[in-house]
Amino acid sequence: MMLDAFRKLSQSWAAKVVLAVIALSFVLWGVSGYLFSNDSGEQVVAKVDGEKISAALFQQRLHDAKEHYAQVFGPQAAAEMAKDPGFARDVLNGLIDNLLLAHEARKLGLQVPDSALAQKIEGISAFADKGKFSRAKYQEVLRANGLTPVKFEAMLRDSMLLEQLQAVPQILAEASTKDAESAWSWSQEYRDARVVQIPVSNFLKAAEPTDAEIRAYYESHKSSYQLPAEVEVQYVTLGPSDFGQQGGSATATAASTSSVATDHGSPQLAFESQIENFKDKLFSDSGSLAGVAKAYGLKIHDSGPLVAGKVASSGVFADPKALDLAFSKAVLAGKNSSALSLSNGDLLAVHLVHYTPPRTQDLQAVRQDIATSLAEQKARQLAKERARELLAAAQKSKDPKDLDPNGSYPEKRYSDLARHSSVGLDPALMNAIFLAPAPEGQGAPSFGMVDQKDGYALYALTRVILPNRALLNPSVTQEIQRSLEEQRARLLTTGYLQALRQKARIRIHDDVLKRFE
């Protein structure tokens, strides 16, 4: 859908400018030093080798991203993109990568002369009038896209600077005609194989553990059978919604309590005015939540069983901090907890109902699990030993029949296997079959063994059918060459950036970034 949108929109000159701006903004944002803040008092979302990316700049980049996407894809599609949890982090990673490349360009002493920059601008058709560059048209187009000449030229200079760095992986990624022919031949190759499955399940009966083995395993793995602590608590929450304009429960109840003032205008202000009173009430009536619930007209809820270290799938205790609060020392001592601020701004307080400390399950409770685990381990070992015996016999005789001489195991024969069609074989087995050396003429098959989830697979590669390269169309060869070069360049560029990241000192301030996600 996105590619279709790009194709449709890219036909107009205005859209081409928008796409160019997006490329500059998203791929090459913020390389120039003036885009980054050195103000020590300003909030920072990340640092790259000491150079700061300010929260103000990052917020502007997010805004620009949404605006540019809206111009290309439409406001609705752009809004959906911006909702993606990774949208803000992707923009930040783009800024970091560009800053790393800029640092590298400076170290290498790369430069873009003014004459080269001017030639580049004059060659952009969107700035031409009657086939020639027009200063008036140039300023008009930039203004329509929210850019000044200074800003656009700085971004374009950075783009050209980084193009010099990008030229290296593009040169290294060059693919020859021979490479393209090999890739085509590789994709068009067919193979015949025989596969014998050695299931672990066939050996389970012979692998049944003794009582002594079960007990010995239990004694040496007791820590694995430790049950975590559990707790059940009562809890209340207090937030702005409890101080509604129409007389929420907290407002109505607090109005009759002399210690609580309620005339503060908005629910948010009313809530904020009561935070300290709420905390004091929890402390003064620490033996129960009844007092604070009555003072604010709150409902006392029951958490149900909570397990240490396991957050709930939904509700208040899906927040790890809330779970930690339920297991805090004060709560386990039978007192009200402190007031915890939740992610939505509400306050949470809990009180103990029941606590079960961590404990070790006795042998009887886990005997069957141990027996099953030991049997599977031993059965897998027996299956492996049998598979190796059969493989060695077949390799010695050079006869695929010796992979299963007695017909004891499931066998299948596959003809014309292709890389693009797995016919139900798992990827590891397919990969092994296509990496196996081809039999020469009427020579011996290639044999091998692959470890699988349910056992072991033995295979014999009996025939390889190679395509006739004379049938390869030259235009297809060129297309494969281009594809290989693009993939190689992408991998080289990714690897280059990863190497730069590993050497750099990068710190992302997650607490600041979270505000934008």
Image: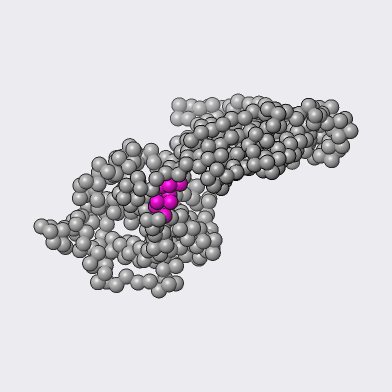
Magenta span: 179-187
Residue 39 seen anywhere in this rendered image of the structure: no
Residue at position x 89%, y 33% in the image: 212
Residue at position x 30%, y 49% in the image: 475
| 431 and 466: which is toward the camera | 466
Q: Position of residue 369 (x, y in %)?
A: 77, 29
Q: Quadrant of residue 393?
A: top right
Residue at position x 35%, y 63% in the image: 163
Q: Position of residue 416 (x, y in %)?
A: 48, 35
- Residue 250 in the image: above or below residue 443: above
| 421 and 258: which is toward the camera | 421
Residue lying at the far bottom of the rendered structure: 109
- Which quadrant of the rendered structure holds the N terminus? top left
Q: Is residue 186 magenta?
A: yes
Q: Position of residue 136 (x, y in %)?
A: 15, 60
Name the magenta segment's main secondary structure: helix
Residue at position x 76%, y 36% in the image: 382
Residue lying at the far right of the rendered structure: 212
Residue lying at the far front of the rendered structure: 442
Residue 424 seen anywhere in this rendered image of the structure: yes
- Residue 91 in the image: above or below residue 353: below
